[in-house]
Structure formats: C-alpha cells, structure tokens
Amino acid sequence: MNRLRVLFFFGVLAIVILIARHNSKPNSRAESPTFAPPPVVVASPVATSTPAVVAPRVVNQTPAPQPNPPQSAALQKVAENAGASVILVSAFDEAGKFLRTGTGCFISEDGRFITSSSVVQGAAHAVAKTTDGKIYNVSGVLADAPALDVAVLKADLKTKAPFLLPNKSAAADNGTLIAVVASPLTRRKPTHFEGTITARRSDPTGEWLELSTPVPNENIGAPVLSEKGDFIGVVTSQRAQGAVANIARNAGTLDALVAQIDPHVTIGWQAAQNSPNNGPSPPGEGPTKLPPRFAKIPLVRADQPGNSRLIFSPKPAYPNAARRSTTPLQGNGRFRVKFAPTGEVKQVEVLESTHNPTLDGAATETLRRWKAAPGQEWSATVPISFQP
C-alpha cells in the first residue's frame, strides 16, 4: 500500500513538471517582444546625442584663423631684418600743433631718412621714433620733391643707425612679391604688408610701382622690399592715374634724389623760413650756427636724470623789437621749464634774467610752446643766449 502511494506521488510530480515546462515556452515567446525594444530605446538617444558631442570636438581641434597669414617665409624674414631701420615720423607746425604721423626709413648711419613729402608737408618741426622707443629731433629737410611725393630729412642721432640703401638694379617686375615694412611702434599685427607689384608705370615725373596691397595712412613713407631683401621703393600718398591701390616711387627715383643733395646744404624747415615774422628757427637742443642776431640754447639739462624726453623744442626767435633797437640787445639767461604728465608746459620760471624784459619775454613765450613725451611730471633747466 505504501509502495503504491510513493509511486502515485512521483507520478503526480512528473505530470506537474511536464505541465510547467510546457507553459514556460509560450511565456518566453510572449516576453521576447518585450526585450527587443530596449535596444531601440537606448540606441535612439545615443544617435541623437552623437552630433552634439562630436561637433564641438571638431571645432575645438581646428585652430582659429590668423589675420593676414604670411604668404612667404622669405618676406617674413626680410621684414624682421629691416624693422630696426624703419621709424615713425611725427610732424608739427610752427605753433607746435601736431599735424600727422607717417613712416620713414634710415638710408645712412648718421640719421638721414627718406619718407613721403606728404608726411612733413607744412611742418616746422618733426621727431623720429626708433623701434627701441627713443625719440630724436629732426633737424630739417635735405631734399624735397613734392611732385614725386618723396623727401629726405635728417634726424639728430647720438649713435649710428641701422639703414637700408635703395637698390635701383634690383628686379621689380610685375608679379614680384613685396613686403611693405611698417614700424613695430604702430602696434599693428603683422608689422608688414605682403603683396605683389601689379604694374610698372611712368608719368612726366618719372617711374612708379603699382602695389596690390593697401597701406594704412600712418604707413605712408614705408619702405618696399623684395623677397631678396632689396629696397626697391617707398610708399607714397599719391594715386597716379590708373592706379588701383597704393603706389611706390621706385629705387631709381630715390637714388637720383639722394644723389642731388648738396653736401654743404643748410638743413632747415621751409615753413619756418617762409614765416612772415621770422618765426622760430629750426628746433633743436644743441648749439647751431645761426646768422647774426640770434638766440641759441647751449644745452638743455633735465633736473632729474633720465627724464629729458623733448619732442618739440624750438629756439626763441630774436625779437623784432630788439632788431629795431638802435643799440643791439643781447643777454644771457637761465630758465626752468616744468612739464605736466601730459607733456604740456605748466610753468616757465626765470632763474637768471637776461636783464632785458624784451629778451626775457621772447624766451618765456617760446618755452611755453615746448612739448615733451607724455609720462610723468618733470622739469628742465634751459640756458638761452641772445646775441647781436
């Protein structure tokens, strides 16, 4: 009896197991569609988010475009080598009013430089700023050819200057790659402008080169160099007939102008010489040879060492009232000029009178028009001698 019960129990258990296995197969099939969608649901956001993640990476890996990228490694090197010879020229009128700024290039170690005539047109004084930040007085004009828009001037240097010589035999044909070299003091990047010579032209005044690259106004007067480093021209402000961009007077024209300079020429400023009242003689800080009845400044001494940064320092003109005097007036005096941080004169003090009110007045009036480079407040002692 017990044996039958055991057999019955195992028989029922076997039937239950078979039924369970049979029922598990449909459930698996039914559940299969339930498991299929998750990959679709998961894949969908990944596909959507992929462009958002990848796109920024592509943009970040691409370097930002540089303005005016160099077209020629040779021109880049040429511009770097010539930079020290290039100067900024600031021109002023007789009253010391600022006129304009242009560019120039030293053509001799003693301070001769060439620029556009338009830069110094109407000027009675100018200063030259070199790449090391120093400021030098410009004595005046050695040669001027307004029809060519080219002039040669002289800066009063204390040391020898790096310079470039115009090379009239250098190739300057159509298509020649060129660099117009600007002064680093303009703080423009890059400090040169690359282009080509698009045409060689001529007019009654001579030959000139048409350039493909536009040049800002403050770089009028800048030198034009070839890939070989040859100085082949100077940028001018004139736009000759048929020119579509800036033009440059070629090296042959520059060389001819320099060759015409008289070695004994008296350096001066035409604007001052043409003054109806015999206005201030050419500005400067040192002694010069002047005609009878003149005022000279033997030496300007800064009261604080290292602060002498004069950019406009005309000598006092000999007063007309003194010229008309039956007895020629003369006298020596010392004056202190105090400069504000703006560079303007804030006070002129008479330390030692010339013992003549007319001469003292002429000295004081002129000293009030002096200007210094902006910076800090400082003063200078100025001895002035009026002689018949």
Image: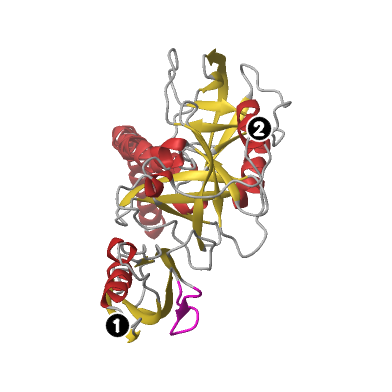
Viewer-nearest residue: 46 or 297: 297
Residue occupying image coordinates x 61% and y 65%: 158
Helix, strand or loop: magenta stretch: loop
Q: Is residue 250 left or right of residue 57?
A: right
The amino acid type found where label 1 is placed reads Glu
Quadrant the C terminus occupies: bottom left
The amino acid type found where label 2 is placed reads Asp
Secondary structure beneath dot 1 equals: strand
How many C-alpha atoms fall within 10 Å of the one at disc 1: few (<14), some, or many (≥20)? some
Q: Report the label total.
A: 2
Viewer-nearest residue: 251 or 143: 143
Looking at the rendering, the stretch of residues picked out in magenta corresponds to: 298-308
The residue that label 2 is drawn on is 255
Residue occupying image coordinates x 65% and y 18%: 173
Residue occupying image coordinates x 39% and y 62%: 314
Secondary structure beneath dot 2 equals: helix
* Tag of residue 349: 1
Viewer-nearest residue: 100 or 324: 324
Q: How far from the left and from the top, in percent, is residue 107?
A: 64, 44
Inspect this view and state whether residue 190 appears: no
